[in-house]
Amino acid sequence: MRKIFVFDTTLRDGEQTPGVSLNAAEKVEIARQLERLGVDLVEAGFPVASPGDFEAVQQVAKTLKNTAVVALARAVPKDIEAAAEALRESASPVIHTFIATSDIHIKYKLRSTPEEVLERAVAAVKLARNYSELVEFSAEDATRSDPAYLRDVFAAVIKAGAGIINIPDTVGYTTPDEFAQLITYLKENTPGIDKVRISVHCHNDLGLAVANTLKAVSVGASQVECTINGLGERAGNAALEEVVMALQTRSQLYQAQTDVNSRQIAFTSRLVSSLTGVGVQPNKAIVGKNAFAHESGIHQDGMLKNRNTYEIMTPESVGLTQSQLVLGKHSGRHAFRAHLTELGYSLNEEELNKAYQRFIELADKKKEVTDRDIQAIVEDETQKIEELYTLEYLHISSGNTTVPTATVIIKHQDELLQEAACGDGPVDAVYKAIERATGIDVYLESWSIEAATGGKDALGEVTARILADGKSYIGRGSSTDVIVASAKAYLRALNRYLQDTASNRPQRRKAAWE
Ligand code: KIV
Ligand code: ZN
């Protein structure tokens, strides 16, 4: 079996999903989980893009011990130097430099010539090699580039020291057969290509990212670039969980395997969804809520007789267990901690205490506390946001013949800010009251709610997305009371905004009652 390297770019291309912005602590948390998942490379960010991205790459580089950490850089010296500096403490650094090779990009975007682009590509790889043993070169928009020119560029960068050549389908334009032809042509005609790793990076504009990636593997690519839940620019990137499970389920067909521990997939998907605020569609392959659900009678009958009738892989193989938490409200912290470790969490003492407290409260209210509830609680209590404003008190009055009214008390440093407001509905009233109390005026872009589990007593998980100073910020909150969950989500989105603009934090307006 051939080994296929898995290059995860959730923290870089995935973070380019509209509205998604991860801070350094969140990136580190996801990176740790990606290491547990067993990917070979984690692309942590684009260090020159912003001080925040630089710091995130630096922290991920310091944290990961067994996984290569990749930093992106245009074929520009200052980008490569920033990437090298951010990766300085990585045990296994990889600089990933790129430049576009298609005529349309060269002419209109770069306002350059093919000759100049080739020179810049070579110079970038040579410079990057001064800092990093392993350098990846990507020919952006490769699938719309002239194959002969692409061959020349790859031959030149291989000679300059690139160890991985990446063939991106940047705009999701190619098809499996055409992509296979291009890769075969490059394999047969590029001097030195047999000494380097061939990587592919497919976008999903035509819904073909996974199919193109798998086809590339079948004609000799040995690295796949993917994101968890298929996050990424526009329609996203090839979904890691789909590529990995296709290779695992059809390993005989592909004669290939990855080192990914597929049992960590469900947890990783959930963590990424929670920290990015981007939900997973129910019918999404592998990680969607319905991916292993059998609805029709005929299917259920078949499943009862033999699971293989309608199941090509087990839910357990991707880490989905039906397990109900065997702990109850009388369980001790020790057992709770042990169960969290089993689920893949590692909490510090303070986080553990808070999560345990919430668990006991929930166990009091709910008949059954499931692993999914525990995940919702832990994610709620361990959000890596500086909580500048927190909810102390909330009261609403609402109904079909009343004007929805909310009173809130918000804690800010040592101050308690009390305000009340009316709204179109209880959530609107609460958000208006919070706006008055904090003095921060933002636009609510979207609000959504999901029940963590079935049942009337389920935890409600709210995602609120706000728009402030032209940027989107996401907050999530969970509670058995959906209005409380809504208030928490909104405050977290506000806190995230304030954290982002820490240096020019808005002055709070005086509340009406002060
Ligand atoms: O899609 C793309 O071309 C990229 C490159 C930077 C690899 O993301
Ligand atoms: Zn991309």
Image: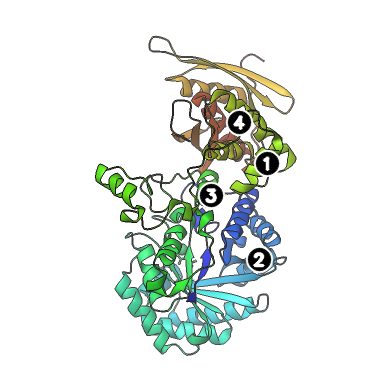
Query: Where 239 sits versus 91, above or below?
Result: above
Comes first in the chain, label 4 or label 1: 4
Comes first in the chain, label 2 or label 4: 2
Residue designated by label 3: 267
Whether residue 367 is visible to the viewer of this picture, yes or no, is yes
Residue designated by label 2: 66
Residue designated by label 4: 328
Residue furthest top in the image? 401
Contact (CB < 8 A) between labels 3 and 1?
no
Mark 3 Cα shell of 10 Å, populated few (<14), some (14-19), many (≥20): many
Q: Which element is circle 1 on?
A: helix
Residue 337 disc label: 1
Q: Is mark 3 within 8 Å of ligand 2?
A: no
Mark 1 Cα shell of 10 Å, populated few (<14), some (14-19), many (≥20): some
Q: Residue at x 61, y 49 (%)?
A: 344
Residue furthest front in the image? 305
Contact (CB < 8 A) between labels 2 and 4?
no
- Distance of mark 2 from mark 1, alpha carbons? 25 Å
Q: Nearer the viewer, mark 4 or mark 1?
A: 4
